Image (spheres, rainbow, N blue to C red):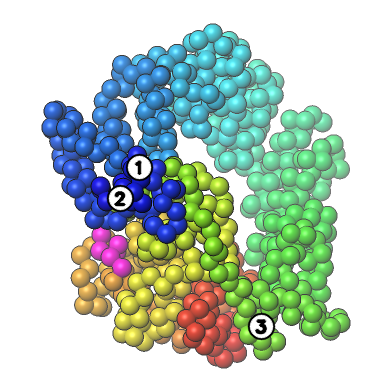
């Protein structure tokens, strides 16, 4: 530590505040060894905390004045002091914890504790605005009520109550007081009922009857009946009122989910006898169109659907419609539909490609300029355009700029904490801290942090920095060759391309070995445990259960084994194999008619995630190969010639 503090002959107040003065010639991050003594003391302090923060603990803590994880110790001890903690003391700790996720975590703990004790002035004493969490918002408005601000409290209660789902239990006391003071009027009750209908919450519609008068109760009964049996609106006798118009509109929306054709006929008949608002009409039309586009049987009339898409000019509906035209190869329809898109959507590489492609098929003038411009972009469709012209792929990579290091102490606090957490094998906490730091800094500083991550071999964190700052042309940050020896070794073992395997991992996990998806996929290659067990039975590995999937060598081997099986199943066709890796072989079988060219098949896949996945991995493979100086080809001759 002494060597660090007196670099350049000038004393510094800890490593955190030396970095700016030292300049770019000296790394502002202490080496791992420089924190060895403090790290050992920190781990000893954690043990002492478990047995009570006695004299030995206090002695250790005092020796950690500059250690970036000392605030974690204070966080733990401060949680035990919440009962008697004043707002001023809480704000002092939160200020000290700024730059770390502990600040917001402590605030939540403090607010929950004060709400539980009903110490409402203390609760409000640390806040300048309502909290983001719904639970804490409920407490916030209870606190406003308890401290003499009923107007604020009841306005907040109304906003929290008017949702299409059952609200957090913490809101119940607030809602009880609001109801006693008058509660919702008929318009708000009806508004919530419609939200519940849309959210498919029939139970909530029935619940709302308890707050309604006789007339509104009858309308809620009818709304609930239509929710349960939407065909009821075909025979219903409805008055010319706004609420009955809503019942008709929402009933048609629900009927469209079952039969777009029947919904279309019902809407047409009822529109002749009832005055509906523009909003109600558009709601019905949009739903019928959407479900007609996906319906295998009984869609609304095709001409009507086309006319509505043209009229509504809704990009989401237009894109669904365009994908169907791509699958059909209806080139004239594609040209028409492209004109219905917003200018921003028209400018996307995907739709520039289909503009040129459909013009060529129709023979409508020279498209050379369109293909040439598209071929200059770095994307799946840009690479397809380059193939079309026989031109080289354009990576458009930006070199690392000459940038001064950020001087914010908060940034270097975050960086120092990341380093220490990684050394202590707290990878998930390190990831959380890194993302927190990225969110706290200016976009320009995110590129600097990405450079720093590369210097430290924090490759997945460099990817996070590039994504956070939309630094798309810094390919060195976005596509590092992490675990490259393992990818090469396993690719040779499985007779696969190492560049493909790392491209899969890059798309799946952002090269973060400890990634875990919401559905339970784990590790670099994002394997489900069931798939991993199946593949492990075919390999001699050190697999010892789900935790093994966070070990790169095991995860890459099992993922490669599964990918090789898919490649065998699809005769080494990467396009189908990648689609199956993402969506499953059974879906690929359903999607494959054996009649479509590759570009039409990929861009008409019904799952947006799978479309993007296949295109991304193929493009990433090109990028990895080209950056390594290896010949790159987006598609093999057999993949290009195949029918899908």
Above or below, 87 against 108 in this view is above
User: Element under label 1?
Assistant: loop
Q: CA distance from mark 3 to mark 2?
A: 53 Å
Q: 527 and 463: which one is in front?
A: 463
Q: Is residue 548 magenta?
A: yes
Task: Name the residue located 29 percent from the left edge and 56 percent from the top edge.
Answer: 31
Question: Within the image, what quadrant is residue 27 found in?
Answer: bottom left
From the top left corner, tell me how far across and down residue 597 is, in percent. Answer: 64, 83
Residue 245 in sight in this render: yes
Residue under label 1, please give it.
12
Q: Which residues are magenta?
A: 547-552
User: Element under label 3?
Assistant: helix
From the top left corner, tell me how far across and down residue 121 is, in percent. Answer: 45, 13
Question: Within the image, what quadrant is residue 471 found in?
Answer: bottom right
Above or below, 163 against 300 in this view is above
Residue 179 in the figure: left or right of residue 89? right
Q: Is residue 82 magenta?
A: no
Q: Which secondary structure is most common in the magenta stretch? A: helix
Residue 442 in the figure: left or right of residue 114? right
Residue under label 3, please give it.
386
Indicate which disc, 3 or 2, sits on the residue closer to the N terminus.
2
Indicate which disc, 3 or 1, sits on the residue closer to the N terminus.
1
Task: Name the residue located 47 percent from the left edge and 59 percent from the top edge.
Answer: 450
Decide: few, some or many residues near mark 2? Use Cα within 10 Å; few <14, some 14-19, many ≥20.
some
Q: Nearer the viewer, mark 3 or mark 1?
A: 1
Image quarter of the C terminus: bottom right
Q: Residue furthest top?
A: 148
User: Element under label 2?
Assistant: helix
On residue 4, which mark appears? 2
Q: 294 and 460: which one is in front?
A: 460
Q: Nearer the viewer, mark 3 or mark 2?
A: 2
């Amino acid at each position: 530590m002494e060597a660090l503090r007196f670099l350049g002959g000038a004393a510094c107040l800890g490593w955190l505040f030396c970095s700016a003065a030292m300049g770019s010639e000296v790394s502002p991050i202490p080496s791992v060894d420089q924190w060895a003594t403090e790290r050992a003391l920190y781990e000893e302090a954690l043990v002492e905390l478990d047995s009570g923060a006695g004299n030995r603990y206090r002695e250790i803590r005092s020796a950690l004045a500059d250690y970036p994880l000392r605030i974690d110790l204070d966080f733990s001890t401060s949680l035990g002091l919440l009962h008697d903690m004043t707002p001023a003391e809480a704000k002092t700790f939160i200020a000290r914890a700024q730059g770390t996720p502990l600040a917001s975590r402590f605030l939540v703990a403090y607010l929950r504790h004060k709400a539980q004790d009903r110490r409402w002035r203390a609760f409000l004493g640390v806040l300048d605005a309502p909290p983001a969490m719904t639970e804490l918002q409920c407490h916030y408005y209870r606190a406003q009520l308890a401290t003499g601000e009923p107007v604020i409290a009841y306005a907040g209660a109304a906003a929290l109550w008017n949702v299409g789902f059952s609200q957090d239990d913490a809101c119940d006391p607030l809602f009880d007081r609001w109801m006693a003071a008058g509660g919702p009027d008929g318009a708000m009750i009806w508004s919530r009922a419609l939200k519940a209908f849309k959210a498919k919450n029939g139970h909530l519609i029935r619940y709302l009857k308890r707050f309604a008068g006789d007339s509104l109760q009858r309308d809620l009964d009818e709304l609930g009946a239509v929710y349960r049996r939407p065909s009821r609106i075909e025979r219903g006798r409805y008055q010319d009122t706004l609420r009955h118009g809503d019942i008709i509109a929402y009933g048609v929306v629900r009927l469209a989910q079952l039969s777009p054709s029947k919904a279309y006929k019902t809407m047409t008949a009822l529109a002749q006898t009832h005055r509906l608002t523009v909003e109600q009409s558009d709601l019905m039309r949009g739903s019928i169109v959407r479900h007609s586009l996906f319906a295998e049987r009984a869609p609304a009339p095709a001409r009507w659907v086309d006319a509505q898409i043209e009229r509504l000019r809704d990009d989401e509906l237009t894109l669904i419609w365009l994908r169907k035209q791509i699958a059909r190869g209806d080139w004239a329809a594609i040209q028409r539909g492209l004109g219905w898109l917003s200018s921003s959507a028209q400018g996307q590489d995907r739709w520039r490609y289909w503009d040129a492609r459909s013009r060529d098929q129709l023979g409508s003038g020279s498209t050379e300029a369109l293909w040439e411009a598209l071929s200059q972009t770095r994307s799946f469709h840009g690479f397809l355009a380059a193939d079309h012209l026989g031109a080289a792929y354009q990576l458009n990579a930006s070199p690392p700029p000459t940038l001064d290091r950020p001087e914010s102490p908060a940034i270097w606090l975050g960086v120092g904490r990341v380093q220490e957490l990684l050394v202590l094998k707290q990878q998930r906490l390190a990831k959380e801290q890194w993302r927190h730091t990225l969110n706290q800094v200016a976009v320009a500083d995110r590129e600097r942090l990405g450079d720093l991550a590369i210097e430290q071999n924090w490759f997945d964190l460099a990817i996070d920095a590039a994504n956070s700052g939309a630094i798309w042309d810094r390919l060195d940050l976005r596509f590092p060759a992490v675990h490259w020896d393992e990818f090469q070794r396993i690719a040779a073992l499985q007779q696969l391309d190492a560049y493909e395997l790392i491209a899969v991992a890059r798309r799946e996990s952002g090269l973060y070995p400890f990634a875990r998806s919401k559905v339970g996929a784990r590790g670099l290659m994002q394997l489900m445990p069931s798939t991993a067990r199946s593949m492990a039975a075919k390999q001699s590995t050190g697999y010892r259960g789900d935790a093994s999937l966070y070990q790169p060598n095991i995860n890459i081997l099992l993922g490669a084994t599964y990918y090789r099986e898919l490649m065998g199943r699809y005769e080494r066709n990467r396009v189908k194999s990648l689609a199956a890796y993402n969506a499953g072989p059974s879906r690929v079988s359903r999607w494959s008619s054996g009649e479509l060219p590759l570009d039409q098949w990929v861009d008409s896949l019904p799952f947006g995630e799978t479309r993007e996945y296949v295109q991304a991995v193929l493009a990433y493979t090109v990028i990895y190969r080209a950056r390594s100086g290896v010949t790159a080809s987006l598609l093999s001759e057999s993949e290009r010639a195949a029918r899908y």
